[in-house]
Image (cartoon, rainbow, N blue to C red):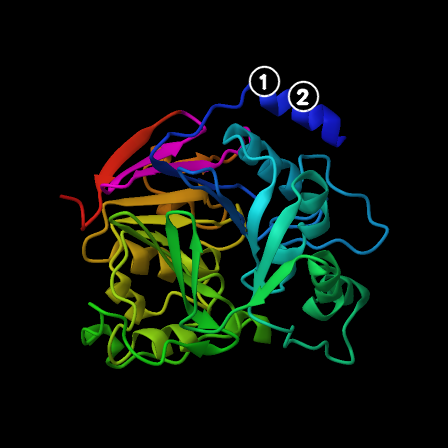
Amino acid sequence: MRKSLLIATFLLCAAPAGAQELKIISVDVEGGAAVLMRTPAGKSLLIDTGWAPGQGGGQGLTPGEAPKNEPSSAERIFQAAHSLGITHLDYLVMTHYHADHLGGLESVLALLPADTFVDHGPNRETLPPDADVRRSANAPQTRYPAWLAAAKGHSHISVSAGDVLNVGALHIRFVASDGRVLKAALPGAGRANPACAHVPPPPRVGGEENDRSLGLLMRFGRTRIVDLGDLTWNKEIALLCPANKMGRADIYFVTGHGMDLSNSPPTAAIDPLVAIMQNGPTKGGSPDVVKTVESYPHLQGFWRTHAMVRNPELDGDPNYIANLRGGADGNPIRLSITETGQITVTNSRNGFSRTYMARGAP
């Protein structure tokens, strides 16, 4: 789809963002990751870019293979951006270089130019010598040069754990980067984590770049938001054990699409009020992870991008699921957050919404 046609279509339905609200859209990129944010002052930030055109749901394409006939991750991100009045990105944050996070890069930038590029540093994941064509085409080693090329001539920040980035009224602390986590607990954090006892070893890692993923602790007004990308089980434990170095969250983007290579028992210390899972119909939403998230002590709302094909009995209330089996696809989950800590989450599929109050709300 051409950029001019997309602009003409989406500007017709664009709505101005709330004057004093942080707007967040968790875009449906079919089991990839893309979270778009707009501050009250109009500053924009995109975390990850989903899949390359034609890819999604964990199914990579071999070079020359015909793409799927559905809107790409980039087109869905573009639609979300224009619904918020965003025409360019002030910040593009890449948690790590796997194809479900980096794949949409070139297509997104063709529609939404970015000013500042943020990452964890160089790619750390190399290809094994016996990698087949498909794996080679989608590997971080293959895709990473495009990230460097895109960032050339722009502001480019490689952050370390503990670094701070302010995007207007949105304050970001990077709690993990390039395999390292916070050295010491943040002010107000540091409580002992009883869930650290007798934690089994991780089932798998899923590639070196997952270990290197950025982890973001964001604060807007009285609300705390956590997005750990695809940070793995072992790195979660380093961050949360024996004490929770970052403290609790009000909103938690479930790590790694709800796959069991993340979401270890110690994540109970994050103790969110609202959880958003960026899963696909056949990717993520592992049974053990769903049970772990549902067991968080003060969870009030568990929202999911997709109903699950493999374990439909774990779906729960369909009002909290943006895309159902057999229905129209591409529906995002939208959040509006006031400076005083009122959090409204809306399912764009049916308009169902719920409002929560952050712990710091008056």
For residue 76, say whether it is visible: yes
In the picture of the structure, the residue carrying the numbered disc 1 is: 12
For the N terminus, the quadrant is: top right
Q: Determine which quarter of the picture holds residue 335.
A: top left
Rendered location of residue 145, percent (x, y)? 75, 65
Q: Position of residue 258 (x, y in %)?
A: 43, 57
Task: Where is residue 239? Give x, y as percent.
Answer: 35, 75
Per the rendered image, the range of residues in magenta is: 326-350
Marks 2 and 1 in Cβ contact (< 8 Å):
yes
Which residue matches tag 2?
8
Q: What SS does tag 1 mark?
A: helix
Residue 62 position (above or below residue 354): below
Q: Is residue 329 one of those drawn in magenta?
A: yes
Residue at x 43%, y 69% (from the top left corner): 163
Q: Disc 1 residue type?
A: Leu
Q: Nearer the viewer, residue 290 or 27?
A: 27
Q: Residue at x 42, y 76 (%)?
A: 235
Q: Secondary structure at mark 2?
A: helix
